[in-house]
Amino acid sequence: DAMVIQNPRYQVTQFGKPVTLSCSQTLNHNVMYWYQQKSSQAPKLLFHYYDKDFNNEADTPDNFQSRRPNTSFCFLDIRSPGLGDAAMYLCATSYKQGAYNEQFFGPGTRLTVL
Amino acid sequence: AQKITQTQPGMFVQEKEAVTLDCTYDTSDQSYGLFWYKQPSSGEMIFLIYQGSYDEQNATEGRYSLNFQKARKSANLVISASQLGDSAMYFCAMREVNMFSGGYNKLIFGAGTRLAVHP
């Protein structure tokens, strides 16, 4: 089945130690998104890729970076995780055109910072 | 700026009964889309239903229906015949279309409503 896959499902890192979360999709969608969701809060968009074009949200900290080497894969890099970066990170994809542009979400990666 | 408001932090419903989850939105755009997502404790966001601003009929998907009242800017989710597996967090979201970026759809989420279904 076509889907959005996130690895790992659970990630533990140390304060200040760089960490990378991965997302892959078999939907061949043009747009890939990264959301941060803290406990009991709504998902918050960090950035997205439209094909190879990177679009950063204005309030996304510089500590967060992203890479999209090809259509299928997208990575979230946290350069120096702080305790406040502990959250669920959700990857999503959508097809670029059409009035109906549902976003398909992966299962998420829950990040713990020690 | 666009905004989604979900005023019910938590809701309880008896199994097999219907429940309505409220959602109001604010936008100056004429063209927009409204989504409902379900998030179980496992964390995955599951798409439930979509309503376009120009759709004349209320959207329905199985046990889910969307009570869309455009003049009041509300898009309430109705779940009929609740099941224990419906216990989850429910998010209302609005699609903001950025026409300068090829039409990608940024989702603006509400704060969510936690639904508990009791046997």
Image: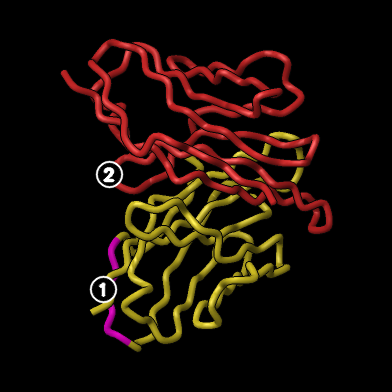
Residue at 63% from the left image edge and 61% from the top image edge: A71
Dot 2: element: loop
Which x, y percent locates residue A54?
Answer: 68, 70
On the picture, is B84 further left or further right than A68? left
How packed mark 1 is, by other alpha carbons closer than 10 Å (few <14, some 14-19, many 20 or more), is few
Do badges 1 and 2 share one subunit?
A: no
* Secondary structure character of the magenta stretch overall: strand
Which x, y percent locates residue A75?
Answer: 51, 70
The chain holding disc 2 is: B
Q: Quarter of the image for the C terminus of chain B: give it.
A: top left
Quick one: A82 or B22, which is closer to the camera? Answer: B22
Q: How many marks?
A: 2
Dot 1: element: strand
How packed mark 2 is, by other alpha carbons closer than 10 Å (few <14, some 14-19, many 20 or more), is few
Give the numbered dot on residue A12: 1
Q: Colour of chain A?
A: yellow
On the picture, is A8 further left or further right than A36? left
Q: Colour of chain B?
A: red
Provide the residue span drawn in magenta: A10-15
Q: Is residue A28 visible?
A: no
The residue under label 2 is which amino acid type? Ser
Which x, y percent locates residue B38?
Answer: 41, 36
Give the farthest residue toward the right.
B100
The chain holding disc 1 is: A
Residue at 27% from the left image edge and 20% from the top image edge: B13
Which x, y percent locates residue A3?
Answer: 48, 45
On the picture, is B101 further left or further right than A39? right
Residues at marks 1 and 2, CA–CA distance in whole angstroms: 19 Å
Q: Is residue A83 visible?
A: yes
Q: Is residue A13 magenta?
A: yes
Give the numbered dot on residue A108: none
| Residue labelled with disc 2 | B41
